[in-house]
Image (cartoon, grey):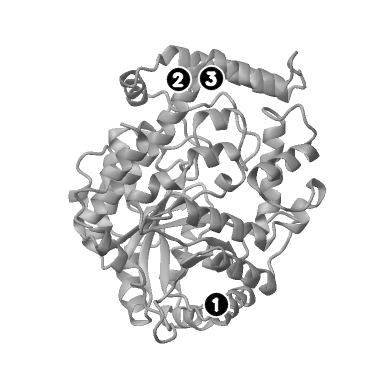
């Protein structure tokens, strides 16, 4: 059975008819003009302000400035910045709501592994939901996979993490939990069932900022300097699944080893005899198992997403289930091919492509650097950027100005339009994540109220049916959030 068919079938049994899913559109509460369906205006937010601040005042400000009617709370995370606290040696993280352990029977994780201690016994969802509801704001847990673990929880969690082609357990970028590990599957499904049954939520969003082993080996990522020897995953569960698919596991492992050697030599300035791209293509022809293994990884993530959708809809078909899509997908023609949103259309109510145009310049430049060190090594960095933007259908600044200017609002419009086209014919809404003060390095472009307003307008021009003001409330300057609100008012959305 092919991937798309699997995911489409995965929706069956949830009890949600197409008509029922259509009724979810416009379920948010907002001050929309009479006769218009409400538009979701969402805001991701760390835990710290939700347990430390006056919620009535904060929610009033969000509503007044930007018409926010949905909160996406980082309710489960082992990363300090998502909790909203400074990183520390003893940071733990975990579930900032109260784990109901009856939902976590088939996972090696304990209550101590999962319960976050940073804010005492405060259950962030229990605290926020009734007050948010009073302000016309729905609450969504936002579960964004961790790519690394603090020392405080590393020992138990490590058994759920991927294994590279050298047999080493991953703990950190680019590795993460294995989608085929039953312990991780059961934890994830237990977590979303817990949220769906225990709290009066509007739905949830799940995200994974990762890509397959081949793309990581080649350094095709906005996070530069990845170790090409850390190709994943070759754990016992992935090996079993690969064999069931008819893949020769050892040939796949050797193929990734040859790719690793190719990248290390390229980074060392050793140009292949026939050029970088020719050598890359030759290695693929010689080792077709590498591509088969890459497809296994991508398919496994989509299968887990279909299972999350089934689980939540089985509890309550009215809950909206959606996916955060990593910004790297909009930089990489390779990952764009793998992360085909059409494949998710059968198990989605909404999809949030991260389209952070201001920070995109620096991130894309880092991506181009990694591409230049492997597949595009025959080209100069400047030409690499020109080729990539041509492949992606962007019209942006030249290489030496990218970081200082960022990407234009046109990038937001084009990527929104592409996402809308991918799910055409399905009851799926595209809610782009637009950039409001996503942190940048020194010398890079800074957000302005005018720039934020242009990005918001571009998203709706591209066909968006909602918007997620991103990436985190605690990072945003009030005037830039007001810029988003001004654009939304001008469009008649709030």
Above or below 318: residue 255: above
Q: Nearer the viewer, residue 104 or 386?
A: 386
Query: Label 2 belongs to which residue?
Result: 167
Q: Is residue 91 left or right of residue 309?
A: right
In this rendering, position of residue 324 left or right of residue 87: left
Is residue 3 placed above or below 245 in the rendered structure? below
Which x, y percent locates residue 445? 73, 60
In the image, residue 206 sits, relative to residue 340, either above or below, namely below
Query: Image quarter for residue 119?
Result: bottom left
Would you name the residue on which mark 3 appears? Answer: 256
Residue 2 position by quadrant = top left
Q: Looking at the image, which residue is at 40% across and 33% down? A: 161
Q: Residue at x 49, y 40 (%)?
A: 210
Residue sitting at x 80%, y 52%: 401
Indicate the position of residue 391 as horizontal and vertical percent values. 66, 41
SS class, disc 1: helix
Is residue 94 shown above or below 27? above
Residue tagged by mark 1? 488
Q: Are marks 3 and 2 in contact (CB under 8 Å)?
A: no
- Mark 3 / mark 2, whichever is N-terminal: 2
Is residue 76 among the parts visible in the rendering? no
> Where is residue 414 shown, x and y percent of the image?
60, 56
């Amino acid at each position: 059975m092919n991937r798309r068919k699997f995911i489409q079938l995965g929706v069956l049994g949830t009890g949600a008819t197409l008509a029922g899913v259509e009724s979810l559109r416009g379920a948010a509460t907002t001050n929309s003009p009479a006769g218009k369906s409400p538009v979701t205006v969402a805001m991701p937010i760390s835990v710290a302000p939700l347990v430390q601040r006056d919620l009535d005042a904060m929610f009033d400000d969000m509503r007044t400035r930007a018409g926010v009617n949905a909160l996406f709370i980082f309710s489960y995370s082992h990363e300090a910045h998502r909790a909203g606290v400074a990183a520390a040696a003893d940071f733990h993280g975990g579930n900032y709501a109260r784990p109901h352990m009856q939902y976590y029977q088939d996972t090696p994780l304990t209550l101590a592994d999962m319960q976050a201690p940073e804010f005492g016994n405060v259950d962030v969802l229990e605290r926020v939901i009734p007050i948010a509801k009073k302000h016309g704001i729905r609450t969504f847990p936002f579960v964004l996979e961790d790519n690394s673990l603090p020392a405080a929880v590393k020992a138990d969690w490590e058994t759920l993490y991927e294994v590279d082609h050298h047999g080493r357990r991953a703990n950190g970028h680019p590795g993460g939990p294995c989608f085929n590990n039953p312990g991780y599957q059961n934890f994830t499904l237990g977590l979303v069932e817990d949220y769906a049954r225990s709290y009066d939520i509007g739905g949830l969003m799940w995200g994974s900022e990762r890509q397959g082993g081949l793309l990581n080996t080649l350094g095709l990522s906005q996070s530069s300097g990845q170790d090409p020897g850390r190709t994943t995953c070759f754990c016992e569960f992935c090996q079993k699944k690969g064999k069931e698919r008819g893949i020769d596991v050892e040939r796949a492992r050797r193929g990734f080893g040859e790719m690793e050697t190719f990248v290390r030599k390229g980074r060392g300035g050793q140009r292949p005899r026939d050029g970088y791209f020719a050598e890359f293509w030759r290695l693929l022809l010689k080792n077709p198992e590498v591509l088969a293994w890459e497809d296994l990884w991508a398919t496994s993530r989509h299968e887990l997403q279909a299972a999350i959708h089934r689980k939540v809809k089985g509890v309550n078909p009215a809950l909206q289930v959606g996916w955060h899509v990593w910004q790297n997908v909009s930089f990489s023609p390779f990952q764009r091919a793998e992360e085909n949103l059409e494949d998710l259309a059968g198990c989605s109510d909404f999809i949030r492509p991260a389209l952070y145009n201001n920070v995109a310049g620096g991130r894309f430049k880092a991506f181009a650097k990694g591409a230049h060190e492997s597949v595009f090594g025959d080209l100069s960095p400047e030409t690499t950027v020109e080729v990539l933007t041509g492949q992606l259908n962007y019209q942006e600044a030249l290489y030496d100005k990218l970081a200082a200017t960022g990407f234009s609002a046109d990038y937001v419009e084009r990527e929104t339009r592409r996402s809308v086209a991918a799910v055409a014919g399905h009851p799926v809404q595209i809610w782009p994540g637009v950039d409001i003060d996503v942190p940048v390095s020194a010398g890079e472009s800074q957000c302005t109220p005018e720039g934020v307003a242009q990005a918001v307008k571009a998203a709706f021009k591209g066909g968006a049916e909602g918007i997620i003001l991103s990436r985190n409330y605690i990072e945003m300057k009030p005037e830039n959030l007001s810029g988003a609100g001004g654009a939304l008012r001008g469009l008649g959305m709030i």
